[in-house]
Amino acid sequence: MTEAVFYFFAAAAVITAAFCILSRSALSAVLWLTITMLSLAAIYVLLSAEFVAAIQVLVYAGAVMVLFLFVIMLLNLGTTTSDLRGPAAVAATVVIAGLLVIQLAALWRYTPSRLASEVAQSPAFSDPAALFAAGELARQEAVTRGVVGGVAVPLFQVYLVPFEITSILLLAAIVGAVVLAKRRI
């Protein structure tokens, strides 16, 4: 049952992402992207990552999409008659989807035992336990600190500068949208 629910949300995420790319209207693209983000949050819940799912809904499906809608409304972008782009965009989508299906079919043949045998045969990775030692340490740290602590420590220690640079770039984008909107008024 869980597998069927996973495939449902995965298909919903892929289809709505394709509609997001193919839509001509910026407003409908944002709405399709919001549905994609909500589908990803549902997949995170299925993977027992409830905190990441909550962050996905609050930050991406909530705040970032509201920011995108604010900028679109501020710029007052015109609407077009058709919601899909021309046949070239549809053909490119079909080609990309076909390549994705080919890659997934190749990955479908991999079983955990086949992967373990290939790793064991590799001279660089003769000890499979060494491959997963970092993951085990991260799991133990998540148990001691909790899920929020496991996410907060790298975010505010290791990745603090990229996090702040991203916030500055988003602020610059909002200021740029306001300046562009003021010129039109």
Image (cartoon, helix red, strand yellow):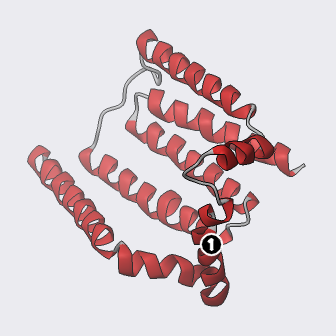
Identify the residue at horizontal 48%, vertical 59% (top origin): 60
Whether residue 138 sits left or right of residue 2 in the image: it is left
Q: Position of residue 80 (x, y in %)?
A: 37, 25
Residue in the foreground of this view, choosing between 72 and 15: 15
Identify the residue at horizontal 53%, vertical 41% (top origin): 32
Residue in the foreground of this view, choosing between 90 and 123: 123
Whether residue 176 sits left or right of residue 127 in the image: it is left
Q: How many marks?
A: 1
Residue in the foreground of this view, choosing between 138 and 182: 138
- Residue 39 in the image: above or below residue 150: above
* Quadrant in the rendering for residue 27: top left
Q: Position of residue 159 (x, y in %)?
A: 36, 72
Q: Position of residue 47 (x, y in %)?
A: 72, 60
- Using a 10 Å C-alpha cutoff, classify the residue at mark 1 as few (fewer than 14 neighbours), some (14 to 19) or many (20 or more): some
Q: Residue furthest bottom?
A: 144
Q: Residue furthest right?
A: 1
- Label 1: state its secondary structure: helix
Q: To which residue does mark 1 refer?
A: 51
Q: Residue furthest left?
A: 183
- Residue 21 in the image: above or below residue 46: above
Identify the residue at horizontal 75%, vertical 58% (top origin): 46
Q: Three-letter amino acid code at disc 1?
A: Phe
Identify the residue at horizontal 19%, vertical 60% (top origin): 172
* Quadrant in the rendering for residue 121: top right
Whether residue 98 sits left or right of residue 177 in the image: it is right
* Quadrant in the rendering for residue 143: bottom right
Q: Residue furthest front?
A: 123
Q: Position of residue 147 (x, y in %)?
A: 62, 79
